[in-house]
Image (spheres, rainbow, N blue to C red):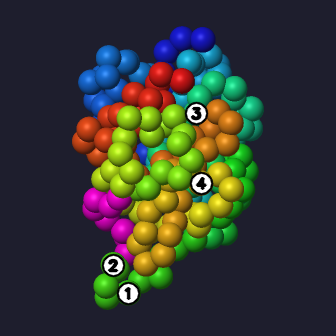
Amino acid sequence: MSGVAIVDSGGANIASLVFALRRLGREASLTRDPAVIAGASHVLLPGVGAAGAAMARLDETGLSGLLPRLSQPVLGICLGMQLLFEASSEGDTPCLGILPGRADPFPASPERPVPHMGWNRAVPGSGDPLFAGLEDGAWFYFVHSYAVGPGECTIAATDYGGEFTAAARRDNFFGTQFHPERSSAAGSRVLANFLAM
């Protein structure tokens, strides 16, 4: 296996992710090619936008069948993390089904506008190596309208009118609801920890 593959699922945060990886000394290829993704040392699944449209792009390229079978480290970011779960209530969209759970919308309120946008703390709960070297309650950057409630795969939680999953893991599959590529030193450490696996 060689190289880092970024799955081209139509996400808008690709350039900042490529730059963040480059700052860590790693080059990455943006691809929809199943062979390149299967042969990569690490796979990143970014995403911004609607769950249904992102899943349609993965279905068109056969990646919705490939991704759950990967054995190398895989990191879903923002919508990419939500796609790792069973479903999203956004358009009642079936997702990849790697992690148990469902993404649901935040209820809007005057005190907590939706989308949840800006810096918030993530509190790790399991000592997962994805958060090695970070203090509890490190700050990360979030932009999202849907979230997955805490569950068996939650490795860090954030509060925004109630707890939700800030990061999740099952075996070699990881997800962050926050954007590590936009989260300064803490986000860079999360990416470095992922690339070290």
Judged by depth in the image, the label closer to the viewer, 1 or 4, is 4
Q: Which mark is residue 19?
A: none
> Which image quarter is the N terminus in?
top right
Numbered range of the magenta stretch: 114-121
Q: Earlier in the sequence, mark 1 or mark 4?
A: 1
The total of numbered circles placed on residues is 4
Query: From the viewer's perspective, is 168 left or right of 86?
Result: left
Q: Which residue is mark 3?
A: 74
| Residue situated in front as seen by the camera: 161 or 15 | 161
Q: CA distance from mark 1 to mark 4?
A: 25 Å
Q: Is 188 a magenta residue? A: no
Q: Are marks 4 and 2 in contact (CB under 8 Å)?
A: no
- Are dots 1 and 2 in contact, CB under 8 Å? yes
Give the Cα distance between marks 4 and 3.
16 Å
The reply to whether residue 7 is in sight is no
Helix, strand or loop at label 3? It is: strand
Say which residue appears at 62% left-offset and 70% top-offset. Answer: 89
Residue at image mark 4? 154
- The structure residue drawn at horizontal position 71% and vertical position 46%, both measured from the top left corner, is 98
Q: Which mark is residue 113?
A: 2
Q: Amino acid at mark 2?
A: Pro
Badge 3 crowding class, 10 Å Cα cut-off, few under 14, some 14 to 19, many 20 or more, is many
Front residue of 159 and 31: 159
- Picture disc at residue 109: 1
N-terminal-most mark, 3 or 2: 3
Q: Residue drawn at (54%, 11%), measured in percent from left and top?
A: 2
Pick whichever of labels 4 and 2 is earlier in the sequence: 2
Q: Is residue 26 above or below residue 143?
A: above
Pair 4/2: label in front? 4
Compared to residue 105, the image places residue 52 above or below, namely: above
